[in-house]
Amino acid sequence: MINKLKDNSSSKSYLNELNNIYYSLNDVIPINNYTILSDIGISYPGAEISSLQNLSGNIYLTDPKLQYVYSISDTTQSTPTQFERLSSGISIPQSITYSLSKNSLFLYDTDRGLFSVALNGTLSPIIGPVPNSNISSIQSYMGNIYMLDSSKGIIYNVNTTTLSYTNGLKSKYLVGARSFAVDGNIFVIDKSGNIVRFYANTYTPFAISNSQAMEYSLNKSSYIYDNQYSNYIYIVDPAHYRIVVLQKPAAGSVNTTDYKFVKQYVYTGSNKSLFSNITDLSISASGKSFYLLSGTKIIKIFI
């Protein structure tokens, strides 16, 4: 029995050593600890969360099905509060984002259009709904708002100063797109889970120079996070339970095609289903926490 225990102990030690070697070779940071800040579906049965945004100690979430915008603490487990609803002018809230340039939240409502949103919940209309469109996601860049209609393959560009919009980009790669991000380039996760890049509204090469270090390719991704202030691009790859970090080119070389793999955060626990359903990501202002959307659950991971 003693020898058997010794063998088991040796096996575990050997496996741990192998894991450590694997992590080192593949730049893996294991996700061992996480917190479920809230499960919106418990407080609001039938909820369907379509986007989340972290700002000023809270996470804001849109629920087009039950017609709410929720707010929860980004530090502790809490019950979501109703940040906005129909009585205040919200009808079908689809997506929420934050513009640092404008220091404001922006919200797109299918029935009522684009609003800026103060932290007290006050709404200010920007434009009405785009006719015959199906806006699924919005992002900000240089104070303007970009709005994705993945059914038609169009990204609209909204000037928040002139309160007008243009058809900024139309492409077959946008049809069925899962998510997008804007930093001067426009990056898209297409319907198949591949990364597509546009520069000056033109389809442009995108390459990861040291992709062999990732072990798995990024062709099953669900979400991309980036903005003009970030030095990195974050890719959610739920098929492999990971978040991949890519280094962006140096400032002033936005059209460089060489993106470098830096590291990957990989979930190594047993609750695989929680991490195989990640559809949205936000990062704290300090850059030390991920906030992930998995169904109606909000997950926090320290990084």
Image: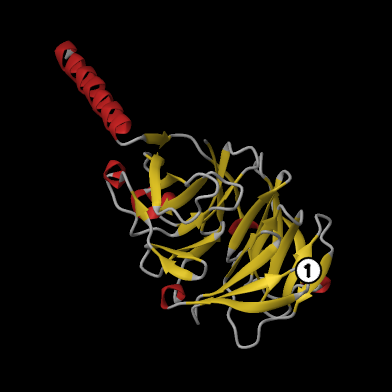
Q: Is residue 283 above or below residue 84?
A: above
Furthest residue to the bottom?
132
Furthest residue to the front?
252
The residue where tag 1 is placed is 161
Between 7 and 210, which is closer to the camera in this rendering? 210
Between 186 and 253, which is closer to the camera in this rendering? 253
Between 163 and 300, which is closer to the camera in this rendering? 163
| Mark 1, other Cα within 10 Å: few <14 / some 14–19 / many ≥20 | few
Residue at x 58% of width, y 36% of height: 288
Residue at x 36% of width, y 39% of height: 268
**At label 1, which amino acid type do we have?**
Thr
Q: Position of residue 239 (x, y in %)?
A: 35, 54
Q: Within the image, what quadrant is residue 86 found in? A: bottom right
Residue at x 61% of width, y 57% of height: 52
Q: Is residue 116 left or right of residue 25?
A: right
Q: Is residue 92 left or right of residue 247?
A: right
